[in-house]
Image (tube, helix red, strand yellow):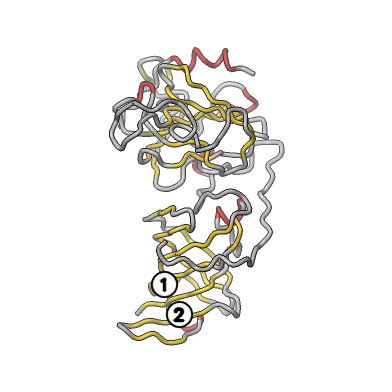
Amino acid sequence: MPLFEREPELMRRHRTTARGALFLSLVAGLLAGTAAARSGGTTKPIVFPILGAAHYTDDFGDQRPGGPHQGIDIMAAKKSLALAAEAGKVKFWTTSASAGCMLYLYGASGTNYYYIHLNNDLTRGNDNRGKCVAGTAYAPGLKDGAKVAAGQPVGFVGDSGDADGIHSHLHFEVHPGAGKAVDGYPYLQTSQHLLFAAPKGKPFTLELDGTVMKPAALTLQVKVTTLYAWPMGQHQTKLHRALLLNVPDTAIVQSTSGSSTRKATILSARIGQAVKVWTMPATASLKTERGDDLSLGAALVLLKG
Ligand SMILES: [Zn+2]
């Protein structure tokens, strides 16, 4: 395990220059979810390591005070959830002054991922009073050495170590074959952003707002802009994400105009029409978390205007 070989690299400074609501009854109509297994090779897309809004550029190799930048700095709101890029095993690393609160993910594919500058604040401010422990830096209840599923929350984005006082971000490194860091940008560009994160098998429902892209008899493609995931209470905006949903016979389809609501059909929907969808309660799996085609079904479709 190359922890100690890697540590000097960590010590290099890599300072960034940038800086219920309505709750459908969760009855069991439960789909059996199987987390897609990742085995061998690194060609499969990883899970984007943050839930929700984040931005980054290819700053791998950029000259920084301590040498070439070894990761990609992904800017995100403080305490955004950091997610496991693939299934694997985690190790906490808490003693590096530059990395701050850090996590290693030893991926099942043989690729290792480093999560650096995890949260160390107890308040919304930059108080630095939190320790590198579960619930502050790492996901609540996560144990050092634990096995994790792809997409499982492993920590919280922050500004610990030499990112202190700088815009919160995740310094994310990719080490194929447990070797040297490579440019993580292509991994992130082809990664799959999750709609929500929940323990596999846990019931959930989504409330989606967006516009109709393609109505059909038993399916509906929606460009989703806003998403609430229940009961997790996770919220995302400005998604611009196309989702292809099943619309079973049992789905309730209505059109609303002003204060009137009437029965409607999916085929009456117009492209570009505003729409709200409640998904059928289902159980969390990597497929549903990614929103793979037809992995989600509509329970209620509200066509607006
Ligand atoms: Zn960095």
**In terms of image quadrants, where is residue 182?**
top right
Q: Determine whether 41 is above or below 206 in the image.
A: above
Spot occupied by residue 279 in the image (x, y as percentages of width and height): 52, 67
Other residues around mark 2 within 10 Å, as few (<14) / some (14–19) / many (≥20): many
List x then y, in percent, for residue 286: 61, 51
- Tell us which disc is closer to us: 1 or 2: 1
Q: Earlier in the sequence, mark 1 or mark 2?
A: 2
The furthest residue to the right: 39
**Which of these two is toward me, 167 or 230?**
230
Q: Which residue is mark 2?
A: 269
The quadrant of the picture showing ligand 1 is top left
Indicate which disc residue 275 carries: 1
Under mark 2, the amino acid is Ala
Under tag 1, what secondary structure? strand
Which residue: 71% across, 39% down? 39
The answer to whether residue 4 is above or below residue 301 is above
Contact between labelled residues 2 and 1, with CB atoms less than 8 Å apart? yes
**Amino acid under disc 1:** Val
The residue positioned 44% from the left and 71% from the top of the image is 212
Total marks shown come to: 2
